Image: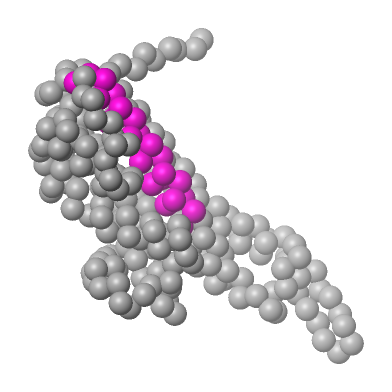
Amino acid sequence: MSIIIKLPQGPIRPVVEALEENEILHGWVTQLEDSATRQLSRLQDDGADIIEEGDQYYEIYHGLDGTAWALDHLFSQYFPGLQRAAAFLVIWGSFERHMNELCREVALAGSYRVAVEDLSGTGLTRARTYLLKVAGLDGAWADAQWQEFPEFQRIRNLFAHGDGSLDPKNAKLVAYVERSLHITVQNNTVQLAASFLPHLLNTKRHFLHGLEEGIVKRFGR
């Protein structure tokens, strides 16, 4: 028997949807972290095909040359790093979509003639500006709970517009990376630790709950 869940309408809807999605993403991130470990275990359990070429012997794991590739590094660092970066971009893009949708719902509820697209800038920073300046929604969500999001945005741009290479001239980003418990740098390339995505999702949840309070107070549920 299927159960129909009716979501609230109006400005609160995008926030509720974002919070529900956030919980699903936590499970997805956990599965991502487990997948590389499972794949390495499967390769090791299946064993290698031994290929003889002259007086040389090679171990081939499902087409991967165990001599040429450091499989432990490949599956414990390289592939998980790619997965985390890709997941980060997906999570961030979805978050921006929910925030822009919130701005549109707020514009309808408040009968504001200015749309979020009319403001300069892009992404979450533009949405925050709209909610603050046009809708007059202030609160902890806009300052204390917002503090790390500009840093997340810089990390996001690093992967979206490049390969994660850290420019030493980018002082703000370098300072954030150095103090972060969830990021390391190897060969001048940013590496997202296993704890980074859960930290991002927890920070996002805290922010959304604060925003939810402001929306309910102003527009109701």
Residue 112: give x, y in percent of width and height: 21, 24
Quarter-wise, where is residue 20 in the image?
A: top left
The mark total stands at: 0
Residue 75: give x, y in percent of width and height: 56, 65
Quarter-wise, where is residue 210 in the image?
A: top left
What residue lies at 53% left-to-right and 67% top-to-bottom? 78
Residue 89: give x, y in percent of width and height: 44, 51
Quarter-wise, where is residue 96 in the image?
A: top left
| Residue 57 placement, left or right of 130 | right
Residue 12: give x, y in percent of width and height: 25, 23
Whether residue 201 is visible, yes or no, is: no
Q: Is residue 36 above or below residue 72?
A: above
Here the colouring is one colour
Q: Nearer the viewer, residue 199 or 57?
A: 199
Q: Could you tell me what secondary structure mostly forms the magenta stretch?
A: helix
| Residue 28 placement, left or right of 109 | right
Q: Nearer the viewer, residue 117 or 172?
A: 117
What residue lies at 61% left-to-right and 71% top-to-bottom? 71
Query: Which stretch did the figure color magenta?
Result: 85-110
**Does the segment drawn in magenta span residue 165?**
no
| Residue 166 placement, left or right of 205 | right
Q: Quick one: quadrant of the C terminus?
A: top left
Q: Is residue 201 above or below residue 171?
A: above
**Does the segment drawn in magenta span residue 105?**
yes
Q: Is residue 2 above or below residue 136?
A: above
Q: Is residue 62 above or below residue 136?
A: below
